[in-house]
Image (tube, rainbow, N blue to C red):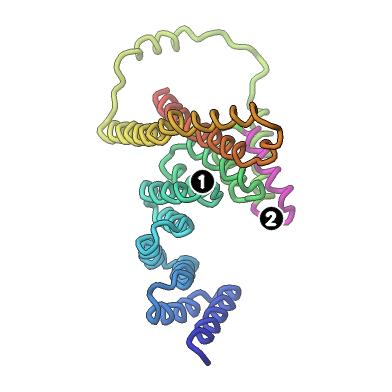
Amino acid sequence: MTQQASGDSFLKLSRDLFRQKRYAEAAEILQIMLEKDPRDEVVLEMLGMARFYNKEFQAAREIFERHTKQNSGHAQAWVNLGAVLNRLGEFRKAVEALRRALQKDRKCAEAYYNMGIAQRGQNLNTMAISAYKEALKLKPDLIEAHLNLGNIYVDMKNMGLALRCFQTAVQLDPDSKKARASLEKAQINQKNARHEVSPFGRLVNIEELDRQNVETGPRELDAAGRRAERELVQEVTRKVRSGTKEMLPMLEETLHSQLHRLERIVLQSEARLASAENLESFSQTLGDLQRLRTVMRDGLAEIREHLS
């Protein structure tokens, strides 16, 4: 048996073990293969996944970090690194890794999905919502994204949107116990909330108005609250600054040149309109600009929500 045939045989065996959820055994085989060929990216990726599924998160992190250093252009490697960092609770680092993934592949639904988890982990709910929505634009049948998005709406007391998310998840997979349980719980919460609503009007409470007038002075925050607020502002500022740096070249160069090309095509013969390449590039640029605008808008909304 040749070395290549032997490698293929071990790789097949590892995949069979994956299907049987025997991740520790698969990892042992993949580790031996990696020692023989440290540059084999397929083995490297599978070994990281075996460690991840076996809940060896620190070991998985080391493998995925090695993968990104070996091939910094591999989008999926950055996504995998972001996913394991989320499991380790290192949400800020996860965001950085997932940004790198999206720089390589702007249409990676998994990157946006994991970004939503990372931003939710930092209590940046509006930005997490935006990330989940981007994931669902690219992959509408991503059930976990619908469920996670619904859970955010539940926390925000927006039961109407939460129900819509859970209903979509159930439609996509009627056998999903998790989706059905989430939907039933949301329906119960909505029903209880309706019963709690008083049918009678209520005049303004004068004492409450007086209290509000007294509290219009400077806010008093303890050290932890001030630190959390400072970190929130710094995080949003960094996102806005990063988005602005990415947006400016698009507005000044890319968008201008694409509009110029489209104008020339329209003014020329109809035969030139047969190719959709220029229109697709223009649409993608508009989509990128809209995404960046959403990130900046949601970041500022997050600050406003915090201050309110």
In the rendered image, the vertical position of residue 59 relative to residue 295, given as above or below: below
Residue type, mark 1 in image: Arg
Judging depth in this view, the residue of 190 and 301 nearest the camera is 301
Of labels 2 and 1, earlier in sequence is 1
Query: Is residue 154 visible in this depiction of the protein?
Result: no
- To which residue does mark 2 refer? 176
Q: In the rendered image, which quarter is residue 146 located in?
A: top right
In the rendered image, the vertical position of residue 200 relative to residue 47, given as above or below: above
Residue 108 image point, x, y percent: 54, 50
- The residue tagged with tag 2: helix, strand or loop? loop
Q: Is residue 255 left or right of residue 278?
A: left
Query: Is 280 included in the stretch rendered in magenta?
Result: no
Tell me the magenta residue range.
159-178
Residue at the extreme bottom of the image, as rendered: 1
- To which residue does mark 1 refer? 106
Where is the C terminus found, in terms of image quarters? top left
Give the Cα distance between marks 2 and 1. 30 Å
Q: In the rendered image, which quarter is residue 159 located in?
A: top right
